[in-house]
């Protein structure tokens, strides 16, 4: 068992299998701001949109993602599970689109595609 797996087990009463990743969706503010400062309300019609989430547990076959990473995934292709009254999303590593660079210049408000 690797270090990132054992620390995941102390937080949640589950053990992830294969290439599965358990994430906590970023439900932050529903409205967004454009780069020029224009407020975009949550009710604005948008095309298919990807979402950010924080990794809370990983399976033993996961190679590119670790605990506490922020990942980009398609919210249409998700499986929700409730653990200890908290809703999480279960995704496969191959279904992820990106991992956020924690040392990059972007803030959480600036991570939009």
Image: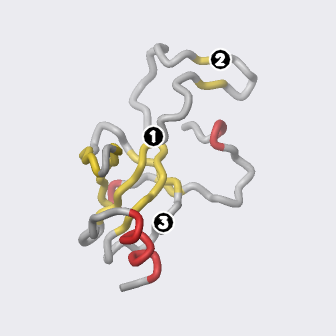
Q: Earlier in the sequence, mark 3 or mark 1?
A: 1
Residue sitting at 29 percent across and 51 percent down? 83
Q: 82 or 70, which lies in front?
A: 82
**How many residues crowd mark 2 within 10 Å: few (<14), some (14–19), many (20+)?**
few
Where is 99 relative to 38, above or below?
Answer: below
Residue sitting at 32 percent across and 77 percent down? 60
Q: Is residue 44 left or right of residue 18?
A: right
**Secondary structure category for the residue under label 1:** strand
Where is 69 relative to 106, above or below?
Answer: below
Residue at the farthest front position:
84
- Label 3 or label 1, whichever lies nearer to me, is 3
**Residue 25 occupies which quadrant of the picture?**
top left
Residue 48, percent across and down? 39, 30
The residue that label 1 is drawn on is 51
**How many residues crowd mark 3 within 10 Å: few (<14), some (14–19), many (20+)?**
some
How much space separates mark 1 and mark 2, taking CA atoms? Answer: 18 Å
Where is 1 relative to 56, above or below?
Answer: below
Residue 58, percent across and down? 37, 67
Residue sitting at 74 percent across and 22 percent down? 37
Q: Is residue 113 left or right of residue 14?
A: right
The residue that label 3 is drawn on is 67
Q: Earlier in the sequence, mark 3 or mark 2?
A: 2
**How many residues crowd mark 1 within 10 Å: few (<14), some (14–19), many (20+)?**
some
Q: Residue 39: give its label.
A: 2
Q: Are marks 3 and 1 in contact (CB under 8 Å)?
A: no
């Amino acid at each position: 068992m690797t270090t990132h797996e054992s620390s995941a087990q102390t937080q949640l009463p589950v053990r992830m299998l294969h290439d599965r990743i358990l994430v906590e969706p970023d439900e932050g503010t529903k409205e967004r701001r454009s780069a020029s400062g224009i407020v975009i309300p949550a009710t604005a019609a948008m095309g298919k949109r990807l979402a950010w989430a924080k990794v809370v547990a990983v399976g033993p076959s996961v190679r590119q993602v670790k605990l506490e990473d922020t990942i980009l995934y398609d919210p249409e292709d998700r499986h929700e599970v409730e653990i200890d009254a908290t809703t999480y999303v279960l995704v496969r590593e191959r279904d992820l689109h990106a991992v956020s660079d924690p040392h990059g210049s972007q803030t959480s408000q600036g991570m939009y595609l």
